[in-house]
Amino acid sequence: MSAIAHRPTTVRLAPALRVVGLVVGGAGATLAAPLIYAAALGEDLVPYLAPLVLSGMVFLAAFLAGRRLETPNRREALLAAVLTWLGLSALGILPYVLGSAPGGPQGVVDAFFESTAGFTATGATVMTDFAAQPRALMLWRSQTQWIGGIGLIVLAVIFLPRLAVGGRQLIETETAGPQLEKLAPHLRASTFRIVGVYVALTILVIAGLTALGAAGLAPGMGPFEAVTHAFTTVSAGGFSPDSRSIEPFGPWAQWLIAIAIVIAGTNLALWFRAIVLGRVASFKDDELRWYLGIIGVGAVIVLIELVASGTYGFADGIRQAFFQVASITTGTGYASADFALWGELALGTLFILMFVGGCTGSPTGALKVMRVVLFGRVILREIRATIHPEQVRLIRINQRPVNPRIVHGVLVFVLLYVVLVLLSGVALLLDPGRPEGLNFEDALSASAASIGNVGPGFGFLGPMGSYEPFSAPSKVFLALLMVVGRLEIFPVLVVLSRAFWRA
């Protein structure tokens, strides 16, 4: 029999941990940027130098261990994907513990929460005094979201060239659901092309925001603000170095960021096909049309509420409604105003949009538009089947029938997602140390914002608020929900199942 037939099917920790070491150690190399920035500003270097050295040692150990370890099998690669997100969160703890000022993440639990919110591209924060924090730390904070947006795929491809199955599993885990179509015959080439779009969009946003600041059209938008906001815009992360998010930078910056958010929420593969390969017809995509339609309808509903209530005039209302709907739908979590003070219709619309997310192949979280569309078409099919039971109707996307297994998986995922949000909201209320005045609506918004990698919720968790009032157990719980949401639930459930660990 072949060697493959004799290969053990049990899960071995060593190959999985090597993958984690390579990816987390590689991500740690990016600490060089805030280290250099801190040196230029005369700030303390230890918060970045210590984890940089530590991550370098982890990477070196994982690299050298590869000479003795076999290539991970599929289950080990799945375990590595789950552990990698936890490892990235652990990597980000030291800069906060060693470098944050009062009003920042104080202690290991707060640092873990902030780091996890960064790497999972969730806009939640425990900070209360943004101005007091070192600028190099705020650069690192934004940088974690940029890395989390798509960096896992980059690092897996760069550092794991021999790990064909594992590399593919990491990417399939990151883009769970209807799979990305290949842009090139080989996985690595496809990945680099998607990453190229991601990097190009980041550079364009930096240039645009810098130009607006230099022209006096975006007050307070200097190069530092342009870079940090570009990182967290393109990654759909939502961290801002300003406690008022995007509000202080004026309408021009808000319009540019809103448009960039919408673009970042699309399938990045479409842009490569259309711009580089000249296939403009790629934009005739069902998911893209529904994505833009959902944002458009949501913006109109919120606009009606804002104008009817007298909160804003028509012109300002258009900007505020479009910005906030785009931000919440994609899970970016930016705010151009304190929307927690808006009317019930606007808040209800934004809460529903927390569940939607962007397109497959984007760095966004939540359900993803493709799943929402498939779920809606299943409901429509069942209604028609009730009226015309003799007709057989297939579920189609882009005129092509969808495999029934995918449809079934989508239905299970949507149900599981909603149940998890509801149960998590109840769990927050069961915490004896819960914040005073926490009601079910606020707790539900916290769980939905965490699982959907959105960030801000309602009440004291609003866009100008903070998660700091939660107890340490609740913060850890919410941080883990961010990881579960980023991995899209199933990989975590699989790894936690008994069957996964059996031979």
Image (cartoon, grey):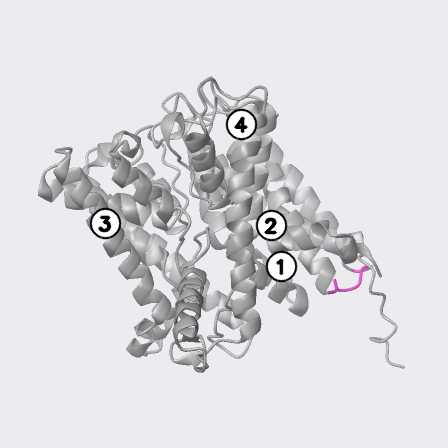
Q: Is residue 257 magenta?
A: no
Give the residue number, with chain letter if any, for mark 1. Answer: 159
Could you give the CA–CA distance between mark 1 and mark 3, rounded to whole angstroms? 42 Å
Could you give the CA–CA distance between mark 3 and mark 4, rounded to whole angstroms? 32 Å
* Residue type at the position of mark 3: Ala
Q: Position of residue 151 (x, y in %)?
A: 51, 53
N-terminal of the pair, mark 3 or mark 4, is: 3
Determine whether the residue tagged by mark 1 lies in a helix, strand or loop.
helix
N-terminal of the pair, mark 1 or mark 3, is: 1
Q: Position of residue 359 (x, y in %)?
A: 40, 61
N-terminal of the pair, mark 3 or mark 2, is: 2
N-terminal of the pair, mark 1 or mark 4, is: 1
Q: Nearer the viewer, mark 3 or mark 2?
A: 3
**Placement of 467 over or under 32, stated as above or below:** above
Give the residue number, with chain letter if any, for mark 3. Answer: 299
- The residue located at (15%, 34%) in the rendering is 309
Looking at the image, can residue 474 be seen? yes
